[in-house]
Amino acid sequence: MRVLFTCRPGYGHYYPLMPLARAAAAAGHAVAVATGEPIRGVAEADGFEAFSAGPGFAAIREAFVAKFGPLDEIPPEEHRSFFFGRVFTGIELPARLPELLAIADKWQPDLIVHELSEFAGPLTAEITGIPHATCGYGPLLEPEITDVAEASAAEHYLAAGLAPAAARLYRSLYLDPCPPSLQVPAASEIERRIAIRPEPAGTDTVSEPAWLGSLPQRPTVYVTLGTVWNQDLSFFRIVLESLARRPVNVIAALGPGKEPADLGPQPPNVRVCGFIPHAQLLGHCDLVICHGGAGSVLDSLSAGLPLLIAPQAADHFYNARRVVAAGAGRCLHHADLTPASVSRELDVLLRDARYRDAAATIAAEIAAMPSAGGALPALTALADGPPASLQADGKPMTE
């Protein structure tokens, strides 16, 4: 089987596909990744055949500002709808589609697997008649966001001579990495859904920094804003100020584009890093303070760690609500973020065992989910029996 994985050019969109890609490669299937920079280069460094498809992350950011103006002019509560309705489907889909079609023609995949917000992949599959599967990266989209995304994507399906119904997000096989305690009831209504265990990035890394094993015997707090929303260092300054004189170890990962020196000197209990894989780090931690990105949330809960979430944008607010509802963390909105408020929230999370118990329950759910290898038979069956695409009149393309 030849499997083409497609994703937006962001770490948080690439990493959820990697357990499947590695499992497929280990089982002897041919695997390739199609995306923009910097992720195309990351996939190549990870040992995959990698194709350039669509604009890179920097180019997307430039196109966004040129068309819509600065992101901070859009209210955060509107980000989710705006990205799915205007960016993922409006800017990225048409820009990525021609290259994906050319890659599919040249590489001849038997199956396309795309992450949920990469919309050129399923359209390429429908145009070419190649079966496709969708891989999620967190809780199911809110119904109103699903409606916005499908309506926007349907315009491109119609332009390709396909029925709008072909643009439905969960029309094909859905690979669901969200544990039951965080998932929404509507997920059970998806006709073809397979649970797949989320795995922290860096699972295949052999060694870890020596200093991780020599931390003092006291609670360790991990602070991160992920790989996209990490540009505003004021978040780190506020959080680190609140933790600097407390009896805790603090590990702050600034992410791509930032260096430890950007924050200046820190007290002995604080270690600032540029980037460190979650698989190396989380087993040494007791609590995570983060923005609420799906990867950071699922990776932390996989390790049974409660969360303090300070949502920044996109899906962060939604993920925070799911975590709070599950009892595995607390939410502190940006306007309320001060050293004193962070310190108060830290006290609650470290002293109240109910948060750690809830996080441990979710960790057990994740551990019980099937591994990526367990999804391969369903993917093989999908590749062996491609569904017919729908024309604009709703009839199969094969008629």
Image (cartoon, helix red, strand yellow):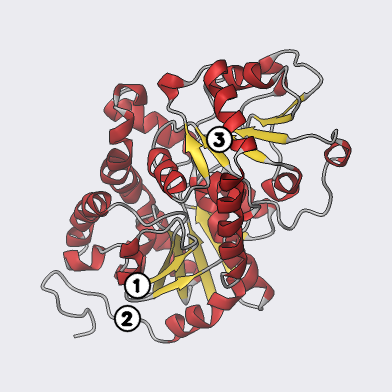
- Location of residue 161 (image quadrant): bottom left
Front-lying residue, 329 or 74: 329
Front-lying residue, 385 or 289: 289
Front-lying residue, 159 or 115: 115
Local SS, label 2: loop
In this view, the mark in front (1 or 2): 1
Residue 162 as seen in the image, left or right of residue 75: left
- Say which amino acid is labelled 3: Cys
In this view, the mark in front (3 or 1): 3
Evaluate if marks 1 and 2 touch, with contact meaning CB atoms under 8 Å apart.
Answer: yes
| In the rendered image, the vertical position of residue 289 relative to residue 184, given as above or below | above
**Relative image position of residue 87 (x, y in whole percent):** 32, 41
**Relative image position of residue 55 (x, y in whole percent):** 44, 42
Residue designated by label 2: 387
Disc with the residue nearer the chain's start (2 vs 3): 3
Q: CA distance from mark 1 to mark 2?
A: 9 Å
**Which mark, residue 347?**
none
Q: CA distance from mark 3 to mark 1?
A: 33 Å
Residue designated by label 1: 172
Local SS, label 1: loop
Residue 208 as seen in the image, left or right of residue 134: right
Residue 385 as seen in the image, left or right of residue 12: left
Residue designated by label 3: 290
Evaluate if marks 3 and 1 touch, with contact meaning CB atoms under 8 Å apart.
Answer: no
Can I make out residue 234 in this image? no
**Relative image position of residue 80 (x, y in whole percent):** 32, 41
- Quarter of the N terminus within the rendering: bottom right
Residue at the location (25% across, 54% down)? Answer: 143
Front-lying residue, 249 or 234: 249
In this view, the mark in front (2 or 3): 3
